[in-house]
Image (cartoon, rainbow, N blue to C red):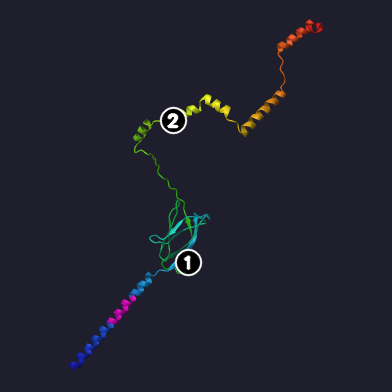
Amino acid sequence: MRVIIKEQSSHVKLYRIILSVILLTIVFAAIPEQAQAQGRKRVVQLSGFVTVGDSLYGVSGVSVFVPDTDRGIQSNRYGFFSLPVLTGDTVVFSALGYKTETLVIPQNYPSTSYSIIMQMQEEAIELPEVTVIPWATERDFKEAVLALELPDAGRSAAERNLDPERLQELFDLVPMDGSANSKVFNQHQRIQGQNRYLIPTVSPFAIIKLIDMLKNGEFRKK
């Protein structure tokens, strides 16, 4: 009887060991599949329209990208864009003069397409004043100005061009163009018209002398 009990107990231990090994194998085999199912991402086609605030004016040239990846695009001239992303991605919308906006694609998003209207808010950026000079300090600039020597060639050329004799020589030698000739002709025509209708003036002394001559009868003597 003792031998039979020992054999039965050894069979039970062996059975328990085999059962434990099978259970552990099943558990360890299920863990990677479960982790893979939890970390699996699906491709979603993100499309939309970028506007200025709540208006319908599209913003062109907006950078739409997923950070730390090579996936990105810019909105077209009308503000439209389309970009393939993954579930769980954070999409950034960035443009000069506008505040940066972000969009998170839900991890458990069920559809294969995602459509949005992204409203970009304008942002005024004031840049500090910058003075650019080729000198390190203001003192160096003043010293360079004081040490500046103006060339004599330019001054002599200006004096020569403004010489009255030189100007008169140019006036006599350089012919007038069509516009100048037309202007001079019109001036002459206007002067001739004024002279044609000009009323002759009579001196009051000549009138007095004429009256005296009439009184003295000088015209009758002739």
Q: Is residue 28 left or right of residue 151?
A: left
Residue closest to the far left: 2
Q: Is residue 57 left or right of residue 216?
A: left
Percent position (x, y) of residue 103? 43, 60
Percent position (x, y) of residue 184? 64, 29
Residue at the image position 31 percent from the left and 76 percent from the top: 28
Q: Residues within 10 Å of mark 1 (few under 14, many from 20)?
A: few
Q: Is residue 11 above or below residue 222?
A: below
Residue at the image position 49 percent from the left and 27 percent from the top: 160
- The residues colored magenta run 21-30
140 in the magenta segment: no
Q: Nearer the viewer, residue 78 or 192?
A: 192
Identify residue for label 2: 153
Identify residue for label 1: 113
| Quarter assignment of residue 131 | top left
Disc 2 element: helix
Disc 1 element: strand
Residue at the image position 29 percent from the left and 82 percent from the top: 22
Magenta: main secondary structure equals helix
Is tag 1's residue or tag 2's residue first in the polypeptide sequence?
Answer: 1
Q: Nearer the viewer, mark 1 or mark 2?
A: 2
Q: Amino acid at mark 1?
A: Ser
Label ID, residue 74: none
Percent position (x, y) of residue 214? 78, 8
28 in the magenta segment: yes
| Quarter assignment of residue 105 | bottom left
Measured in 3D between alpha carbons, the distance from the residue under mark 1 to the one under mark 2, in whole angstroms, is 75 Å
Quadrant of image for the C terminus:
top right
Residue closest to the far bottom: 1
Q: Residues within 10 Å of mark 2 (few under 14, many from 20)?
A: few
